Amino acid sequence: MKSINYFLFFFALFNFSVVEAQEYALSFEVLAEATGLPMDDAQIAITPCACGGITNSQGRFSISLPEDNYNVTVSFIGFQDYRLQINLNESKIITVQMVEQEEQLSEVVVQAKRRLTQIETPQMGALQLDAKDLKKIPAAIGEFDVLRGMTLVAGVNNAGEISNGLSVRGGSLDQNLLLYDYAPVFNPTHLFGLFSVFTPDMISSVDLYRANIPARYGGRITSVLDVKVENPYTEKTRLSGGLGLVSSRLSLKTPLVKDKLMLNVGVRAGLTGFLLPLVSERLKDTKANFYDGTLKLLYLPTEKDQVAFTGFFTKDFYQLDLITQIQNINARNNQYDFQTLNGTLNWTHTFDDESSLRNIFVASDYTPKTIFPERDNDNEIVYEAKINYLSFISEYLKKVNDKWDYYGGIQANQYTISPGALDPGNGNSILPVTLDKETSYEMAVYGNLNWNPSERLSISGGLRFNHFVFVGPYEEATFDENTGNLLGSTIFGKGDAVKTYNGLEPRLGANLKLGANTSLKASYARTNQYLQNIYNTTTPLPTSRWKTSDPHIKPQSSNTYGLGLYKNIADNTIEIGIEGYYRDTENNLTYKPGADFFLEEFLERDVVQAKGEAYGVELSFKKPKGKFNGWMNYTYSRSLLRSQNEKLADRVNNNQWYPSDFDRPHVLNGTINFEGDKYNTWSFNFTAQSGRPYTVANSVFALEDINVPIFIERNNARLRPYHRLDFSWKVKYGRNPNRKWVGDWTFTIYNVYSRRNPFNLYYSQRQGAVDSDVFLGSPLGTYELSVMNSPLFAVTYNFVFD
């Protein structure tokens, strides 16, 4: 009997031990929700066993545990903690999607941020890039860039090297309205177009309107690029920046008074003159330096009021020896000095969660300067112009319900333009010249209604009315139509109304959902432009002039129509779209044949206003997530102009249609990002487009033993096609998830395969039999000018300190 009891005891003990030893595998795969990439070094804490660990480079972690109920917490710095309860009764694999964590703010700051976000949400039809999207744009020269990011969008391109802005759907550079926290930017680029002037770390979002332009925007006929500065909603200090060969930057975001006053400031500088000779022997005498800075102060006086001030300053200096003689000025080289100083004061009052009023004061000062160091002496001749812009905007917004919301407002602008002043310095070969200032006012009233009649249909309708007045002092001249001689003039005193223009601008957009993943969009916009830039090269240098409308120069106007089909496929991981547009324009400003308007007192004698049309089809493809992500688009488009002058000498191409300077029939842009792991991101950016139109001589005649080309037709030939490949490699490092200092390296190569893209062609008198195998018996030689002939390498160290 005793032996039986011992047997039963040992049998029970054996079975109990077997039960206690039963364990299951608990495995985790931790991914970043935004990118789908694995997260290594994520911390996994398990209770009540007080066990856990960290994930490996594939974002995986596995542990064997007895059957039981467990509480699991997954954490990683900069991400929200992920918590779950697990009943472990079998082996399990858990996939965890980690969400980035926003800074924990006080209730006062959270409410202020939420209310402003509702107010500044872009209207239907905007193509928006927020801060996260901007950081995924391939680094051009070590840092992301707004304008280069925009060229990834179908229908948007620049004019190649030494470009000074964006051409949107075949429009000229000045037909695109560029705003930086509501203030206009007249010169948006640094370093021959390689950088935009917007301080990178200060940007919160970029909205591009190409078709359905909201009624709150006016003054340009092609598009609007609205760049917003980040509001410093913060309760802790954050320092970030970058050190690079081409440019370096530093930014600081910090609270000054808790829940009341916050600061966001960023600066950037580029001292790149020593690099340019390495890029091209042609640039050995070229210099280029730039810097910019942005400051934003946010004050929260009450629960319902926010007052923000944005200050912006940018300055460029560069020297070129590409053109050394202008208006009988014989200079060693040309030096360009550009300066912009902007200020924006924005007071927003929210009556409740559904309505608000904002009042905005804007001041902008743009001063381009050209310096001509004379040959054989130390004297400098200086040409300087200036644009002063003042604006006041008051706008009321109201959300009635989920189906209706609207806004209405007024805007008043003042333009004061100093067309140009030439200071000869100590020289006596050039006389001083100062052109009279021009002053004008633009008043506007506008309203916009957004209506969602059903879940499938959204409609946005707006109306804007402009009243433009050009005032004195002004001298209106009268010329003989046959000889061009001055017959007389009429003098207008200061403040006298010289000429007025009125414009009514309807806007309409509609979005129809054809299914869960398909939508059809249509738009129409009429716009007017009262301020324009006139130049006779694709880049408004060196002799461009800004000009408001007056009795002789009418406002530009356009009617733009758009229709597009968009679809998400592959479980919404791929976005594709096709959009067509047509735009007819009136009063496009261009120069007469043989015009030389440098310091011309009566500009109307050197310009004509032409009719224009632009049309095209845009195909776009976007894969925003995954290890492989990127964009690709192709555009077929035309941009044409036609003068309508009766006088033969004033006709361009004898009043026949001809390609505008920004006519690019074929444009292909592609970007691929490969995020191999958490530490390495490789990016390739490729662009190809038809060659820019240029004017080739129709004939040559001899004048005193000098062969002079004769130009009859304009833009009757094209440069070679433009194409370029850029590469960037971003390397993160550091495995401690709790570190406060986070850094990465960015290596970039601009123009990887050394493409000699032509910038322009010029003629030169041939000397003897030089290059006779190329030009044969032609008395003139045609030479191609390229700027970036070799790769441009850059390395930047970026850092963030919290």
Image (spheres, rainbow, N blue to C red):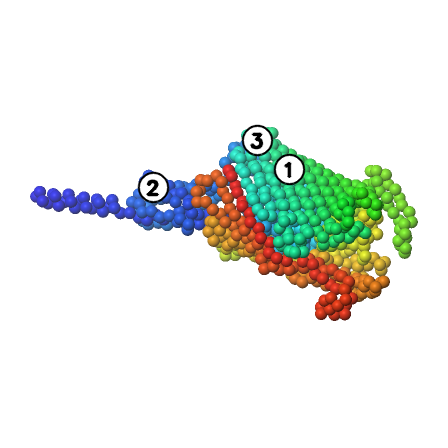
The residue labelled by disc 1 is 310
Q: Secondary structure at mark 2?
A: strand
Q: Against 261, is 171 above or below?
A: below
Residue 207 seen anywhere in this rendered image of the structure? no
The residue labelled by disc 3 is 256
Q: Secondary structure at mark 1?
A: strand
Apparent side of residue 738 relative to residue 260 in the rendered image (left or right): left
Q: Residue at x 42, y 44 (%)?
A: 42
Residue 660 picture location, percent across and down? 73, 58
Q: Secondary structure at mark 3?
A: strand
The three-letter amino acid code for the residue at tag 2 is Cys
Q: Residue at x 37, y 44 (%)?
A: 53
The three-letter amino acid code for the residue at tag 1 is Thr
Q: CA distance from mark 1 to mark 2?
A: 51 Å
- In primary-sequence order, the first of circles 1 and 3 is 3
Q: Against 140, is 254 above or below?
A: above
Q: CA distance from mark 1 to mark 3?
A: 16 Å
Residue 529 picture location, percent across and down? 74, 48
Disc 3 crowd rating (10 Å Cα; few below 14, some 14-19, many 20+) is: some
Write down the quadrant of residue 407 in the picture: top right
Q: CA distance from mark 3 to mark 2?
A: 42 Å
In the picture, the quarter occupied by the N terminus is top left
Q: Residue at x 58, y 55 (%)?
A: 726
Disc 2 crowd rating (10 Å Cα; few below 14, some 14-19, many 20+) is: few
Furthest residue toward left: 1
- In primary-sequence order, the first of circles 3 and 2 is 2
- In primary-sequence order, the first of circles 1 and 2 is 2
Q: Which mark is residue 51?
A: 2
Q: Are marks 3 and 2 in contact (CB under 8 Å)?
A: no
Write down the quadrant of residue 568 in the picture: bottom right
